[in-house]
Image (cartoon, grey):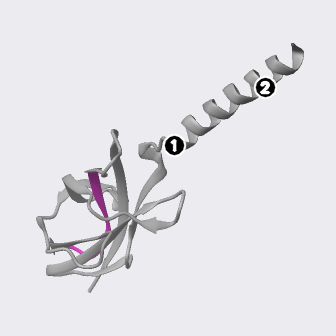
Amino acid sequence: MIGMYSRIAALAGLAVFNTHAAFAGADDYEFQPVSAEIKNGVGAELSIRLVDKRTGKTVPGAIIFRTQLDMSPDGMGEMLAKHEALPPGEPGIYRYKADITMAGGWAFKLQAKVPGEPETVEGSVAFTAKD
């Protein structure tokens, strides 16, 4: 009888472990700069990769629906830059064109929906604009 209870407990523990491992969360993803340096001026290009931290692989097909590009790294969060999405390139790489108005530190803040992930993924990527 004790052996049966041990088997049931082991199976229940395995089921809980497998259920936990199967679900990702928004914290399992990270936005990263492809290059942390960008050109100061009109039409600067910046590229961001979305990475699944559990596998280290880029995540294609995310829908990025809210972005903001500002100078918050230099303490000027109210300094915003116009930007627009460019056509996709490599899978998992998201490209933008921006009008960078000043050299210095810029933060690109994003919110995205990842296929199969119920939570919104949020992140911020730091860039340095140089003349």
| Residue under label 2 | 7
Residue at screen point 34% across, 39% down: 119
Give the SS element for disc 1. helix
Q: Position of residue 69 (x, y in %)?
A: 22, 60
Quadrant of the frame with the C terminus: bottom left
| Residue under label 1 | 22
Q: Position of residue 101 (x, y in %)?
A: 16, 72
Magenta part of the protein: which range?
Answer: 102-111
Corner quadrant of residue 29: bottom left
- Magenta-colored segment: predominant secondary structure: strand
Residue at screen point 19% across, 74% down: 88
Vertical placement of 20 versus 64: above or below? Answer: above
Q: Earlier in the sequence, mark 2 or mark 1?
A: 2
Residue at screen point 36% across, 56% down: 124
Instruction: Check if residue 106 falls in the magenta segment.
Output: yes
Q: Give the residue at the far top of this rendering.
A: 1
- Give the amino acid at mark 2: Arg
Other residues around mark 1 within 10 Å, as few (<14) / some (14–19) / many (≥20): few
- Give the amino acid at mark 1: Ala
Mark 2 vs mark 1: give the one in front.
2
